[in-house]
Image (spheres, rainbow, N blue to C red):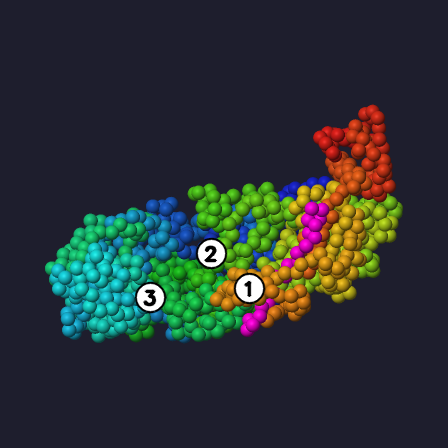
């Protein structure tokens, strides 16, 4: 890429025949650095309306993958577009620095396994180690973000570990506490007994093993049952039975009451789970007698006798009753699930919904029956001190033995199943209720739903279905983690828990404690105490830190250090105009942003959101470094360039929140199908501008007025199409629908290269005179320039590459240093022409029909054919084709275009969409189909005009019926094609004159190929000589000299012997292999 200063002579630079897109992108990056392009664009846009954008912070402990690249491309595209449509767009990168991903790496590196290990090491040393790896890959991130062409500030970043950010997080929490939205409660989490610490779901899911566990069926006598019946419950964790508080049934399932033949005992269990205790489950079985069948809903509310007396007082809060739970299935067990709410997440939730427990029951004995070491407390008198999950399963055995002694054990077996293990200690995990700090969310569900309604999501089904359903059932949010590297929760509390202070700033901490801090991590504040206002012992900070999602949800405020700084600016740009992340953030960042903004300001945190789907490996599996099932992004960029990767990603279904199976060939195809044709059209314009300059002796100076004054129908069409494109892009980008915009842009590039340039090549070469050539060049320049600017946000590199050449011939007042400094084009109203766009679309349609007929009958385009007939009952359709007749004739290589409304060769039939109609009409489909078959031509034509048709009581539309035009003539010499508007008929006979012309076209192709290989411009005069032993080729060359000169400009001469002093030679194949010799001489 060559950049010239404004003072130099202005001309279009000669372009090479081929370019390396990836290498040109590197030159563009260098140029952007030289002019400080991003910073300059921000300065240029100061004073414009603000466009606010939030960038969700990634971790820098791993390298960016295709998911990051996709989200980054979407963000860059939208924010570039916002800048080019007249906005000031601050784009600031952020880093997620705290939390488990960091600690996980440090624990592996340092061999940390337990809380004691951390305390022995010391929290200051542990956190220093975490701090040391936080930005491990930040340099690599910066390099790949830059290489992708993303314009974002990576110098003035925000980091969740920075003092200013953490202080704002404290302020957010303080506001919630002041609104009585913070409380201490329970949360069931995976728990490692040897490590004495809860694990995240991320950690718990990282290691599963197949284990053998006891599976027992236990009887729970129904209170006041006249027949002494018992519920049968099944569990694979017998150690949880001493803490049982409820039984759970599915209200919709069928349950049976049966009498055991052997024991005469009466049991209640799910009808489809009789096999758990009986071999023969038929009603005629001799093992049991069926007494009754009921729905689970009828069992809800019944009381039962608990197994153990340890927590008998819990009956006062509704314990020891049957409660409903949709999660109970007929796949395993008895259909009756025992619930110990402190030791299972579903158990906890179902008991909370039933009112048996509350999250605030922080000191309730039944929820604290297992201590931090995994042992029963003294409340479980029979098993006090026993470790609940020991390697030999001794506790399970003792509990089973006790149940058997009570005659409550109905069946015992073993089951092999997949069970989570602690990745540190390699021991089985348990699920245990641990103390946590919560933010009240349930009380503001309605406000969350209302604020969600005020946002615009693309695609909208994620908002209206997935996210709204999540909000409707939102539970209180556990925001604390028993960790070390994070923002400490600013709660200071007395030993008895009766006095509590929530700190909202560094200054407030200083005022209450007398200690001024410059860091807010645990090592800097855990030692600070606050004097009691009640005269008691000093208040100390709780140990917990914030879940990193709380920090992410606070980023709109914390990145600005609100409200301590930038108060006016924040209030000016909140809520954000736009955010974008993957669909996996529906329950993550999108949710936490909304919860906090609703709690703080009762408004949504953003106005517009694009949700992208997941990028998978080509085999549909998750991308895995270990499996090496995906190509390295850097390698792909080095091979094909960033633009090709960007366009591949944002033109795929993944921008509609669907999954994408990444294919490297898809990126390669973007080069082949979009960028190479686009470059060739651009190069063609530049070549012919130079040819025109050589022919006229004057510089080519593009003028919009010349372009707009053209009367050529194809000129007017491509200009009109360009305006329609710009209008469409503006409308769709306003709605954030990238999935409609990118295909339309690439379609226009296809139409520009494969229709406008292709059909007008001879005009550009001066076939109709230099004035006409100048007009066509003005048209092509104008369109290329507009498309260049319009595609800028999507393909920032190639558009810059083009613009740096195109700008040379622009007037001084219109020349910017970068295409990305140019405001997005407005459509030119005078250039709109819907009629011409429709006419050319019709021309394209019949040409495609003609090509289809040739392909079906294996008649290559090099063989000229005689007649191509188009039949339509629409006079305007035929008139449109008449005006474009020469293009149809040339493109299909035919002698004559016949346009007629004579439908004697046409049968019009209606073809019903049976699948669609079948779903709607059901049994009436057969009768309606018969009536469709009997419709008259007049009926069908009326249907075409009106768009709907009544058959009996049913109304059929164009989605139900397709009109097919069938040819009823001779198929031996004619090949038809068509659609519901038109029928085309291609005559297949070939005469000698047409054969000769086909041979000449082949020769022209070989000559043009050798000229291109020799790097000759169209205006370069050379002597072209040929020799052939094929008399048919020689005759064709003699008979069609005028045609040859019209196409090639310069003559082609026959030579008997091989000439000397040639600079180019090719042995080519025209009719047969190697039957044509071609030389070029100067």
Horizontal and vertical percent position of residue 759: 76, 50
Find residue 96 and name its label: 2
Residue under the point 83% across and 59% down: 711
* Disc assigned to residue 1016: none
Is the Cβ of the residue at disc 2 closer than 8 Å to that at disc 3? no
Q: Is residue 66 above or below residue 836?
A: above
> x, y (%) of residue 102?
41, 52
Could you tell me which residue is drawn at 62 percent across and 66 percent down? Answer: 935
Left or right: where does residue 1003 sit relative to residue 67?
A: right
- Residue 14, percent across and down? 76, 43
Asked if residue 56 shows in the view, the reply is yes
Q: What element does badge 3 sit on?
A: loop
* Residue 159 appears anywhere in the view: no
Give the alpha-carbon distance from disc 1 to disc 2, as whole Å: 62 Å
Q: Nearer the viewer, mark 2 or mark 3?
A: 3
Nearer to me, 943 or 818: 943
Asked which secondary structure carries label 2, the reply is: loop
Q: Are marks 1 and 3 in contact (CB under 8 Å)?
A: no
Going by the image, does 451 lie left or right of 825? left
Residue position marked by numbered label 3 in the rendering: 326
Q: Which of the two discs, 2 and 3, labels the residue nearer the N terminus?
A: 2
Which residues fall within the magenta stretch?
951-976
Q: CA distance from mark 2 to mark 3?
A: 37 Å
- Whether 963 is among the magenta residues is yes
N-terminal label among 1 and 2? 2
């Amino acid at each position: 890429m060559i950049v010239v200063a404004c003072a130099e002579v202005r001309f279009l630079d000669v372009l090479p025949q081929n370019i390396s897109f990836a290498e040109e992108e590197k030159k563009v990056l260098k140029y952007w650095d030289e002019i400080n392009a991003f910073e300059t664009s921000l300065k240029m846009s100061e004073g414009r309306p603000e466009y606010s954008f939030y960038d969700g912070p990634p971790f820098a402990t791993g390298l960016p993958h295709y998911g990051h690249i996709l989200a980054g491309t979407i963000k860059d595209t939208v924010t570039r577009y916002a800048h080019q449509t007249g906005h000031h767009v601050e784009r600031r990168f952020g880093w997620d620095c705290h939390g488990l991903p960091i600690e996980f790496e440090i624990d592996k590196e340092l061999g940390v396994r337990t809380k004691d290990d951390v305390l022995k090491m010391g929290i200051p040393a542990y956190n220093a180690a975490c701090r040391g790896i936080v930005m491990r890959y930040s340099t690599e991130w910066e390099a790949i973000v830059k290489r992708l062409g993303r314009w974002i500030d990576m110098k003035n970043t925000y980091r969740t570990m920075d003092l200013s950010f953490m202080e704002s997080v404290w302020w957010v929490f303080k506001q919630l506490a002041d609104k009585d939205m913070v409380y201490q409660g329970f949360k069931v989490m995976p728990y490692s007994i040897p490590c004495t610490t809860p694990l995240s779901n991320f950690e718990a899911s990282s290691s599963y093993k197949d284990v053998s566990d006891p599976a027992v069926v236990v009887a729970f006598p129904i209170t006041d049952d006249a027949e002494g019946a018992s519920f049968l419950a099944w569990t694979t964790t017998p150690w949880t039975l001493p803490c049982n508080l409820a039984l759970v049934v599915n209200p919709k399932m069928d349950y049976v009451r049966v009498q055991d033949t052997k024991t005469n005992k009466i049991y209640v269990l799910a009808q489809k789970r009789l096999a758990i205790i009986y071999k023969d489950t038929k009603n005629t079985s001799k093992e049991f007698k069926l007494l009754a069948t009921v729905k689970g809903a009828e069992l809800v509310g019944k009381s039962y006798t608990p197994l153990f007396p340890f927590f008998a007082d819990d009956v006062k809060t509704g314990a020891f009753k049957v409660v409903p739970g949709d999660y109970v299935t007929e796949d395993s067990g008895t259909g009756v699930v025992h619930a110990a709410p402190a030791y299972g997440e579903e158990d906890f939730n179902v008991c909370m919904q039933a009112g048996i427990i509350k999250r605030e029951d922080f000191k309730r004995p039944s929820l604290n029956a297992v201590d931090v070491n995994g042992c029963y407390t003294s409340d479980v008198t029979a098993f006090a001190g026993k470790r609940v999950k020991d390697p030999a399963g001794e506790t399970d055995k003792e509990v089973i033995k006790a149940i058997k002694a009570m005659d409550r054990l109905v069946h015992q077996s073993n089951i092999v199943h997949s069970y989570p293990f602690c990745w540190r200690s390699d021991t089985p995990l348990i699920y245990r209720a641990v103390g946590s700090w919560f933010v009240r969310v349930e009380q503001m569900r309605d406000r969350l739903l209302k604020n969600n309604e005020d946002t615009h999501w693309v695609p909208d089904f994620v908002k209206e279905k997935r996210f709204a359903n999540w909000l409707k059932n939102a539970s209180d949010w556990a925001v604390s983690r028993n960790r070390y590297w994070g923002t400490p929760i600013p709660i200071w509390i007395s030993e008895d828990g009766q006095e509590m202070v929530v700190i909202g700033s560094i200054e407030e901490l200083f005022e209450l404690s007398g200690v001024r801090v410059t860091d807010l991590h645990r090592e800097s504040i855990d030692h600070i105490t606050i004097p009691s206002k009640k005269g008691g012992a000093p208040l100390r900070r709780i140990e917990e830190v914030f879940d990193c999602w709380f920090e992410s949800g606070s980023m709109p405020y914390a990145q600005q250090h609100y409200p301590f700084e930038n108060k006016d600016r924040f209030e000016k740009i909140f809520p954000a105009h736009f955010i974008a992340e993957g669909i996996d953030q529906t329950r993550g960042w999108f949710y936490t942003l909304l919860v906090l903004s609703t709690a703080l300001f009762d408004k949504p945190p953003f106005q517009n959101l694009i949700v992208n789907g997941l990028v998978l490996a080509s085999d549909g599996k998750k991308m895995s470094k270990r499996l090496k099932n995906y190509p390295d992004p850097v390698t792909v960029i080095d091979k094909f360039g960033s633009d090709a990767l960007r366009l591949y990603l944002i033109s795929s279904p993944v921008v509609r929140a669907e999954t994408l199976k990444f294919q490297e060939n898809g990126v390669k195809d973007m080069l082949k199908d979009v960028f190479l044709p686009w470059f060739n059209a651009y190069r063609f314009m530049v070549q012919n501008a130079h040819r025109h300059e050589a022919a006229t002796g004057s510089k080519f100076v593009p003028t919009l007025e010349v372009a707009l004054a053209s009367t050529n129908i194809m000129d007017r069409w491509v200009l009109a199409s360009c305006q329609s494109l710009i209008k469409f892009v503006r409308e769709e980008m306003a709605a954030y629908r990238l999935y409609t915009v990118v295909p339309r842009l690439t379609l226009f590039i296809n139409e520009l290269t494969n229709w406008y340039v292709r059909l007008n090549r001879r005009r550009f070469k001066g076939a109709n005179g230099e004035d006409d050539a100048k007009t066509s060049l003005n048209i092509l320049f104008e369109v290329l320039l507009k498309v260049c600017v319009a595609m800028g946000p999507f393909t920032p590199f190639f558009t810059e590459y083009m613009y740096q050449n195109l700008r040379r011939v622009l007037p001084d007042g219109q020349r910017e240093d970068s295409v990305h400094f140019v405001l997005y084009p407005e459509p030119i109203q005078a250039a709109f022409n819907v009629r011409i766009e429709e006419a050319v679309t019709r021309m394209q349609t019949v040409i495609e029909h003609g090509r289809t007929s040739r392909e079906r009958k294996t008649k290559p385009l090099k063989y000229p054919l005689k007649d191509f007939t188009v039949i339509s009952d629409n006079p305007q359709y035929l008139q449109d084709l008449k005006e474009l007749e020469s293009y149809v004739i040339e493109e299909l290589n035919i002698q004559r275009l016949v346009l007629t409304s004579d439908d004697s060769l046409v049968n019009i039939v209606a073809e019903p969409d049976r699948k669609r109609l079948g779903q709607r009409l059901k049994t009436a489909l057969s009768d309606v189909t018969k009536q469709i078959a009997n419709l008259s031509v007049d009926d069908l034509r009326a249907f075409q005009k009106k768009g709907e048709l009544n058959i009996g009581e049913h109304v059929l539309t164009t989605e139900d019926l397709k009109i097919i035009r069938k040819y009823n003539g001779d198929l031996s010499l004619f090949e038809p094609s068509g659609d519901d508007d038109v029928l085309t008929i291609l005559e297949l006979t070939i005469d000698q004159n047409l054969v000769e012309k086909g041979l000449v076209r082949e020769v022209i192709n070989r000559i043009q190929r050798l000229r291109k290989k020799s790097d000759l411009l169209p205006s370069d005069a050379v002597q072209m000589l040929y020799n052939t032993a094929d008399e048919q080729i020689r005759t064709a060359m003699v008979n069609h000299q005028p045609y040859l000169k019209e196409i090639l400009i310069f003559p082609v001469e026959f030579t008997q012997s091989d000439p000397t002093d040639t600079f180019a030679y090719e042995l080519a194949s025209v009719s047969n292999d190697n039957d044509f010799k071609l030389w070029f001489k100067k």
